[in-house]
Image (tube, helix red, strand yellow):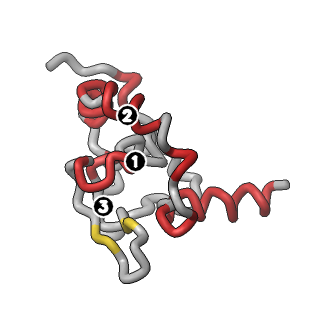
Amino acid sequence: MTTKHFNFFQNKECEYFPCHEGADRETFNCLFCYCPLYMLRDKCGGDFVYLKDGTKDCSGCLKAHDKDFADIVLSKWEEIRAGAALVQYLRPEEQCTTQKKYQVWRKKSE
């Protein structure tokens, strides 16, 4: 596969960088800060767990931060598109922890 420079981005100034423990700081890709495969639930292919309250916890997954992740997203685009139509029906307890961090950050920056 040919290297695509637009598939890799790092924000080392981010207060969460790297947002996953044990991640390699040199190869950590911030391009997909929020995983577009989250909505695919157990079909995302990532390393996640469901918490007791039913929340999908992706904090142990590094798949979205891999340099080849954009190709994976494109290969699952139809599933993502179909899932996007259903997002409005997710219960609040199904929201990803990353979404919650984003909401906290937005409040601080306003």
Q: Amino acid at mark 2?
A: Ile
Label 2 to label 1: alpha-carbon separation: 7 Å
Q: Position of residue 57 (x, y in %)?
A: 38, 68
Quadrant of the image containing the N terminus: top left
Q: Position of residue 29 (x, y in %)?
A: 37, 43
The crowding category of the residue bearing disc 1, from other C-alpha atoms within 10 Å (few below 14, some 14 to 19, many at least 20), is many
> Which residue is disc 2 drawn over?
80
As helix, strand or loop, the secondary structure at mark 1 comes to helix
Identify the image quadrant of residue 4.
top left
Q: Who comes first in sequence, dot 2 or dot 1?
A: 1
Label 3 to label 2: alpha-carbon separation: 26 Å
Q: Is residue 103 left or right of residue 67?
A: right
Q: Is residue 73 left or right of residue 83?
A: left
**Residue at the location (62% across, 57% down)?**
102
The crowding category of the residue bearing disc 3, from other C-alpha atoms within 10 Å (few below 14, some 14 to 19, many at least 20), is some
Q: Nearer the viewer, mark 3 or mark 1?
A: 1
Q: Position of residue 82 (x, y in %)?
A: 39, 31
**Residue at the location (43% across, 41% down)?**
32
> Which residue is disc 1 drawn over?
39
Residue furthest toward the right? 110
**Residue at the location (41% across, 29% down)?**
81
Q: Exactly how many numbered labels are in the figure? A: 3
Answer yes or no: do the residues labelled 3 and 2 have beta carbons within 8 Å?
Answer: no
Q: Who comes first in sequence, dot 3 or dot 1?
A: 3
As helix, strand or loop, the secondary structure at mark 2 comes to helix
Q: Who comes first in sequence, dot 3 or dot 2?
A: 3
> Which residue is disc 3 drawn over?
23
